[in-house]
Image (cartoon, helix red, strand yellow):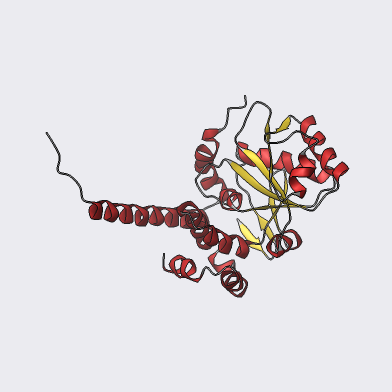
Amino acid sequence: MKRDTVSLRELEERKRLNVEQRREFVKSWAEYVRDHPDGEWSRQQNTVVDSQLPRTE
Amino acid sequence: MRLEGDVLLLEKELSELDRRVLSFVEVLERQGVDYVIVSGYWAILTGRSRGTEDIDVLIEELGKDEALGLAEALEEIGYWCINAGKYEVYGYLSDGLAVRFAEEGEIIPNFEVKFVRDSFDDVSLQSPVLARVKGGELRMGPLELQVAYKLFLGSEKDFEDALHLYTVFGGNIDVDALEMYVEELRVEEGYSELKGA
């Protein structure tokens, strides 16, 4: 089924919303980091930070 | 994590990236090279959940022999310079260019090393925050300057880094210093957005 063509204005609006939601997430994660012990957030963060690095056995 | 004056105390579990940063700066220290880490790694060290291609390191101006000595010391621990031969390192740095060091056989992550060039770099080198982590200490650029400079860089990723630092350290940020850098870098608009985010 062919979908409707999206207008540039709609795309711009989606982009704006996406930026807004990403910022909300970044802020809520930063609040989590601020309010929780280092060991708790760093365990989770390391999965992301190290995902690009080769594993050292 | 606690920021007490110019000392940041972190009890985080070190990431592999953190370990690499510690071993890199250990060589700088052994060679007697004054350094400071600036930009994105500040946010990553303090919890921002993203990877990075490079870690920005400013170093004091070195002579030709000292620069070669540094390149060779890094070579000894298994690093190679991606964009210059070891004899060219000094030339690149003294021309205001960056040299990038990565672990042998790798391109990323790499350490983007530059000589200090301007008054902001001088402030960074002279007024570092000492980040104490398990296994070592890192010299980080002044927090307030990182926030303002991230706003100056202006990409969405940079804004998010600024937002992370501003949120994590809200109560500890020296607002006068931050606003001074905001004014010097002419990023008032971004700063308003940051406060409203």
Q: Quadrant of the C terminus of chain A?
A: top right
Q: Quadrant of the N terminus of chain A?
A: top left
Q: Residue A43, image x and y in percent?
A: 53, 41
**Furthest residue to the top?**
A57
- The quarter holding residue B174 reads bottom right
**Is B175 drawn above or below residue B107 in the view shown?**
below
**Furthest residue to the right?**
B65
Of residues B98 and B110, the one drawn nearer to the viewer in this rendering? B98
Q: Residue B166, image x and y in percent?
A: 52, 62
Q: Residue at x 52, y 68 (%)?
A: B187
**Furthest residue to the bottom?**
B176
Instruction: Say whether residue B89 is left or right of residue A39.
Output: right
**Furthest residue to the left?**
A1
- The quarter holding residue A2 reads top left
Q: Residue at x 50, y 44 (%)?
A: B50
Q: Residue at x 14, y 43 (%)?
A: A4
Q: Residue at x 74, y 49 (%)?
A: B95
Q: Residue A50, image x and y in percent?
A: 55, 36
State the count of labels.
0
- The quarter holding residue B52 reads top right
Instruction: Say whether residue A8 is left or right of residue B101.
Output: left
Of residues B57 and A11, the one drawn nearer to the viewer in this rendering? A11
Instruction: Say whether residue A28 is left or right of residue A52.
Output: left
